[in-house]
């Protein structure tokens, strides 16, 4: 039994509130236990220079933790003049994950930016951001189709992410911060609805882990992600 009463293979309670932001093209608040992230999509009718006159669109992401999201105040990165290495890594991960299920040639020459803002962090903020940003993206695409800007959806599959880890020798699904900070192995897995991998990020914090442990963790993550995709399908259609 874990500190929050879950079994090793259980995902935290998930709540998805669509249309959380009135003015965004698509938005939701995703809550995974005590990790709460606002995800929103914005549409800009232009593309970066390297895509001009190609007929292709672009999808990118930004991520940030609000000052009161953790026990100690998180300093705004705008005051530092540039995002931290961690923030840049997570932004790229979110962007790669969503682009993996989007046909950019069907977007037209427009950019969709996904923003993930962490209201409250308790582990798994990057994975919750990916899962929630997909919902915001699907909502934005639906609006573009309804107003005639797109003739068909460029989204070809669902995508979601979750954390797994080895904690006191036991494989755990969807780690909270207490578990994540003490885990012997910390791993983030991103998968599509068809069960294909987008990314597997795994690190041993102490003793190296075996191929058998890796298989257990990846299998556990796959089961958790399928549960999240079921919730995505209830929220949006592609």
Image (cartoon, grey):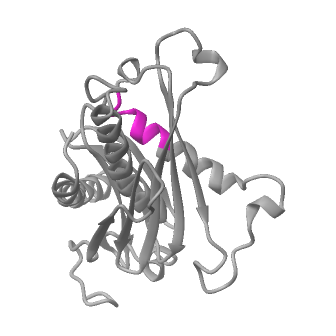
Quarter of image, res 140:
top left
- Tell me where residue 25 appears, x and y as whole percent: 43, 47
Magenta span has 176? no
Residue 233: tell me if it is visible: yes
- Tell me where residue 166 appears, x and y as whole percent: 37, 69
In the displayed structure, 143 sits above or below 71; it is above
Residue located 43% across and 75% down the image: 35
- Tell me where residue 235 appears, x and y as whole percent: 22, 57
Residue most extreme to the front = 147
Towards the viewer: 44 or 215: 44
- 60 sits left or right of 148 in the view: right
Image quadrant containing the N terminus: bottom left
Magenta span has 99? yes
In the displayed structure, 94 sits above or below 118; it is above
Towards the viewer: 12 or 18: 18
Residue located 43% across and 20% down the image: 108
The stretch in magenta equals 95-102
Quarter of image, res 49:
top right
Count of numbered circles in the view = 0
Q: What kind of secondary structure does the magenta stretch mostly adopt?
A: helix
Residue 208: tell me if it is visible: no
């Amino acid at each position: 039994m874990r500190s929050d009463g879950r079994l090793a293979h259980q995902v935290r309670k998930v709540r998805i509130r669509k249309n959380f932001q009135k003015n965004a093209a698509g938005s939701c608040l995703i809550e995974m236990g005590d990790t709460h992230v606002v995800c929103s999509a914005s549409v800009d009718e232009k593309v970066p220079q390297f895509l001009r006159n190609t007929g292709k669109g672009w999808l990118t992401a930004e991520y940030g933790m609000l000052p009161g999201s953790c026990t100690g105040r998180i300093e705004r990165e705008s005051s530092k003049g540039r995002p931290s290495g961690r923030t840049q890594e997570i932004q790229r991960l979110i962007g790669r994950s969503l682009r993996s299920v989007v046909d950019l040639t069907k977007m037209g020459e427009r950019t969709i930016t996904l923003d993930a803002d962490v209201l409250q962090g308790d582990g798994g903020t990057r994975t919750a951001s990916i899962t929630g940003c997909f919902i915001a993206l699907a909502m934005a695409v639906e609006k573009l189709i309804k107003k005639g800007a797109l003739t068909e959806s460029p989204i070809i599959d669902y995508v979601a992410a979750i954390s797994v880890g080895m904690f006191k020798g036991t494989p755990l699904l969807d780690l909270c911060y207490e578990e994540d900070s003490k885990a012997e192995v910390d791993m983030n897995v991103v998968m599509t609805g068809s069960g294909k991998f987008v990314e597997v990020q795994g690190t041993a914090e102490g003793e190296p882990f075996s191929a058998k442990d890796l298989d257990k963790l990846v299998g556990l993550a796959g089961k958790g992600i399928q549960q999240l995709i079921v919730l995505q399908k209830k929220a949006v259609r592609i």
